[in-house]
Image (cartoon, helix red, strand yellow):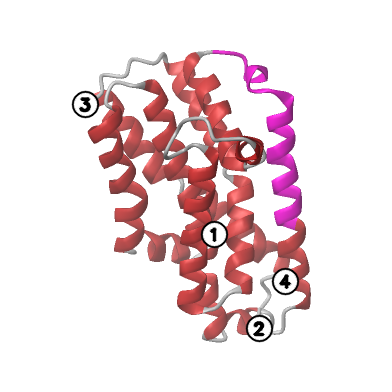
């Protein structure tokens, strides 16, 4: 975990893409808006989870490092758990940076309980994105994996209303409701506004649970049948 955390924090692209960019978007277009605060915090959380959990895995596979780990005392279950924990932990820099910008520049004045609720929602809701990023890292190779993770991130962010908010036409609105990013955005809005989490809808909780279960199953299947990690 120490090695992976240091490697992630030394990645300049990560720091720019998932810390500086959401802060910049908030300052340019959403200063003073709680909705923009939540949206950019969700941006940082989902992107951080995807990239931290799966970003380095493809390179490790290409270098044969994951094959070497199979013959060490480190079990596959502990390795998988470590990657997921890494993904969750690496959501924090972006989330904290956006919240700090909201307080210092946007003059956000949420009560401490709402800040805590928002952070808790984002950390818990990052789990399906960690698993999805890990699956992509175990499936794609090298730069293809990095590109795939970025494409999936922006696709989910756009479809989920994290960026480019506004109603979508026809069936696309239904597609939005089935994305984990949209569900997390609704729960984040509920936490920041002080509403009961149930106001986001039990259906949205089901969406997050379904994505978590499917991505987790995909990771386990890919790990079990993979010959390179």
Q: Is residue 56 visible?
A: no
Q: CA distance from mark 2 to mark 4?
A: 9 Å
Residue occupying image coordinates x 65% and y 57%? 81
- Mark 2: which secondary structure? loop
Residue occupying image coordinates x 32% and y 62%? 13
Taking depth in this image into account, of 37 and 28 the one nearest to the observer is 28
Q: Which mark is residue 228?
A: 2
Residue 200 within the magenta-colored segment of the rendering: yes
Task: Give whichever of discs 1 and 4 has the lower sequence position.
Answer: 1
Q: Residues within 10 Å of mark 2 (few under 14, many from 20)?
A: some
Q: CA distance from mark 3 to mark 4?
A: 45 Å
Number of numbered discs visible in the structure rendering? 4
Q: Is residue 39 visible?
A: yes
For label 1, the residue is 53
For label 3, the residue is 105
- Residue 16, horizontal then vertical, whole percent: 29, 54
Q: CA distance from mark 3 to mark 2?
A: 48 Å
Task: Give whichever of discs 1 and 3 has the lower sequence position.
Answer: 1
- Mark 1: which secondary structure? helix
């Amino acid at each position: 975990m120490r090695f992976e955390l240091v490697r992630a924090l030394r990645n300049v692209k990560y720091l720019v893409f998932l810390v500086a960019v959401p802060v910049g978007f908030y300052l340019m277009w959403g200063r003073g808006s709680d909705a923009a605060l939540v949206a950019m915090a969700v941006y940082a959380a989902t992107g951080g989870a995807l990239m931290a959990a799966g970003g380095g895995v493809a390179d490790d596979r290409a270098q044969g490092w994951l094959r070497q780990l199979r013959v060490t005392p480190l079990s596959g279950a502990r390795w998988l758990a470590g990657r997921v924990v890494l993904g969750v932990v690496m959501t924090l820099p972006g989330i904290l940076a956006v919240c700090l910008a909201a307080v210092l520049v946007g003059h956000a004045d949420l009560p401490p309980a709402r800040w805590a609720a928002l952070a808790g929602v984002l950390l818990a809701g990052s789990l399906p994105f960690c698993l999805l990023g890990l699956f992509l890292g175990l499936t794609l190779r090298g730069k293809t994996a990095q590109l795939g993770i970025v494409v999936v991130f922006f696709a989910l962010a756009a479809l989920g209303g994290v960026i480019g908010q506004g109603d979508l036409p026809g069936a696309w609105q239904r597609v939005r409701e089935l994305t984990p990013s949209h569900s997390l955005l609704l729960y984040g809005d509920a936490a920041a506004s002080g509403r009961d989490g149930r106001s986001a809808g039990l259906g949205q909780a089901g969406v997050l649970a379904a994505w978590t279960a499917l991505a987790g199953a995909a990771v386990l299947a890919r790990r079990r049948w993979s010959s390179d990690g």
